[in-house]
Image (cartoon, coloured by chain):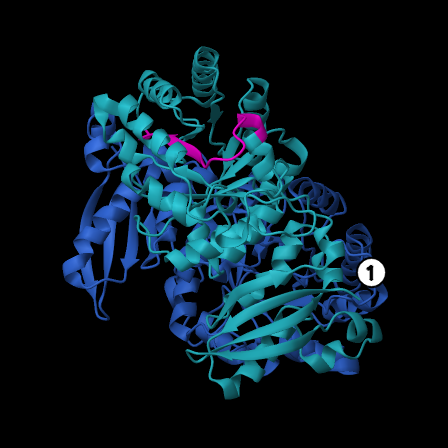
Chain colours: A cyan, B blue
Amino acid sequence: MAFLQVTFRIEAPADEAQAVAESVLLEQTVETPAEVAERDPYVREHMMGKITKIVPVSDGAVLATMDLPTVTASLDVAQFLNVLFGNASLHERVSLESFDPPDDLLAAYPGPQFGIGGIRERLGVPVRPLTCSALKPVGLPLPKLGEICRAFAMGGIDIIKDDHYLADHPFTPFRQRVDACQEIVQEVSAQTGRTTIYCPNLSGTPDTVRRQMEYAQERGVGAVMMAPMLLGLPLFAELVRSHSEVPVLVHPSFAGSTRIRPDTLLGRLFRMLGGDAIIFANYGGRFSYSAETCAGLARAMRSSWQHIRPAFPVPAGGMTVERAPELVNFFGNDTILLVGGSLLAAGDALLERTRAFTDAVASTVPAADDQHGRTQAQDI
Amino acid sequence: MAFLQVTFRIEAPADEAQAVAESVLLEQTVETPAEVAERDPYVREHMMGKITKIVPVSDGAVLATMDLPTVTASLDVAQFLNVLFGNASLHERVSLESFDPPDDLLAAYPGPQFGIGGIRERLGVPVRPLTCSALKPVGLPLPKLGEICRAFAMGGIDIIKDDHYLADHPFTPFRQRVDACQEIVQEVSAQTGRTTIYCPNLSGTPDTVRRQMEYAQERGVGAVMMAPMLLGLPLFAELVRSHSEVPVLVHPSFAGSTRIRPDTLLGRLFRMLGGDAIIFANYGGRFSYSAETCAGLARAMRSSWQHIRPAFPVPAGGMTVERAPELVNFFGNDTILLVGGSLLAAGDALLERTRAFTDAVASTVPAADDQHGRTQAQDI
């Protein structure tokens, strides 16, 4: 019988750890006293799971690894989350460290439909890092967003995305925004011969998001953005699997609210559910992830993993044009650098500043191209 | 202009707090440097929000209250979450303490469709606390679940719910389970003259959950259970609003993974989105909530709040029959006591133990009936 292997971090001294781990195992399996569960032979044989390893870590916590039965976990995304970290999340001392689904469970998940190779192919950019910027701030009227979109496209940005606060607002209604921005990137592409992707943000009720996705794809957009933790993971997964025909850019809004290790949530779970390029808060910006955490995120997104295509890491969050060479060196070529405010701060010189950014990215050759779990030649 | 008032807890010494609060305000509004955002008059006037209060709390943290523009927050649940705690959740030092929507925003949310009064009416139980138990462990074949269901119903349980791990499994397929359990509670009700509600757990992809809800309602079930954090809040809200004709019991699975104060998430947000009865980990059980936190949860669920009906608090999680009088005294009459494993542990004596539980609840008169934010006379 195949098991879902899950590792929890438990804040407890080593002598209490076994008891806490056992209670977490019960919580994530039969959720009754063991003597009740074990009365039934099928339950006893198939439902109990087991603890396979408890490793003390330096700071008074342990990593407890357990095998959970896949018969309960394998039905759908909601049930998978339930078994992965449902009730265990209610234990303050427990956080989710990592998970490893068995092949038969993983086979039910398509992973990214495009991944690094598919996005590169759409853009016709085989090697260098990609560039991305955001249309913002929310509240700008559509003509002003359009001007920014044009400057980004003329300046050589590969992917122009909506700010994640842009929804179907009266000041920039979704359909009008998609029409206008998609027309602009097509016009500029026709002039320059360079493909630029416009990527609208999808947000709303399940029905609304589905309609937005259909509309955007009919208009020919090259990608769409969604925030899985805002929409809910089952809805996100269903949209990717059943409705999406373009690469999916993942936004991390609300994802930091979890007690799940970032590379597990953003790098592994979002990728497994179909994210092609995944935005995260980069080190040295507005947020507090360390360089080590960011390297781990990139590794989780790009590492070899059965049939699951590698996804692009998209470091973001207060990045500056000046840091482009450093970031190319740190993350390597298979990266999308997302710079927003640092371009917009240029005001009337937006086009020049955008060009400075895209030139810096194009002209930097990373010192070594095997950074954080991936060589450039893979999967392109 | 009406504002969404949000209070964040920020772990920072008082002299840094102002700067951190300002960065959180930018993050939750225009998400660009202020000088970029302020260039546009509409953005400057309508999108910036403001900090209204910073109060140091005893342990070296502050509570920062800010007014956020509702024009960005009011479109739908996903966007509301985005503005409430989207990117701010990525700041490790920031957690969500509380929120207060203005009347025009709140008016867009129906709250519980039944609430305490509606559930009491369906059961014909005007005053005493209600009782609830769970069909488990997952893995039991349907006939065994049916036996447990019958014993609970004969023993006087008001609401018999599925364990939250029960999904559409091969060993207890959803439709067969609903057919069998609903037939049992109807049979027993016909014998005893007492209404018993069977409450199936809905889980799956968005389409599946919708179909499950329709099927269960066609079969006449008296309530349904959903876990909003597993399904995603937009899907949960849409299902309640557009598809549910019965009371909704809310399960907290995956809800503990957030850095949101429990009464704010479970008591306020789940209630606002339509939860009629909300399960939480009680003090003194398997989980670590304090009695004070639980009192706050009950208060948040039952307090008077515009047009939003009060919801039942459902303390659970390792409760025992023996604690019934204590819990009735602590939570008062307008409570649903959920006891699972402590009944099932009785084995062959399940019916007797169930009767002991329901008798204890029925015969305990709480010392005072204004516990935790609510008097019994309200809304029944």
Q: Secondary structure at mark 1?
A: loop
**Is residue A135 in the magenta section?**
yes
B317, above or below B83, in the image: below
Question: Farthest residue in the left direction?
Answer: B15
Q: Is residue B25 magenta?
A: no
Residue B41 percent coordinates (x, y): 20, 24
- Left or right: residue B142 versus residue A21 is right
Residue drawn at x 68%, y 48% is B204
Spot occupied by residue A254 in the image (x, y as percentages of width and height): 43, 48
Point out the image quarter for the C terminus of chain A. top right
Side of A27 where B52 appears, left or right: left
Task: Tell me where residue B146 sits by quadrant.
Answer: bottom right
Q: Quadrant of the N terminus of chain A?
A: bottom right
- Residue shown at the point (24%, 36%) measured from the top left: B48
Q: Is residue B128 above or below residue A154?
A: below
Q: Nearer the viewer, residue A227 or B251?
A: A227
Could you say where residue A332 lies in the image, as x and y percent from the top left?
45, 45
For the record, the magenta segment spans A121-138
Would you place residue B16 above or below residue B139 in this image?
above
Q: Which residue is mark 1?
A: B171
Please indicate, yes or no, whether residue B375 appears anywhere in the rendered image: no
> Is B372 on the left-hand or right-hand side of A115?
left
Q: Chain of mark 1?
A: B
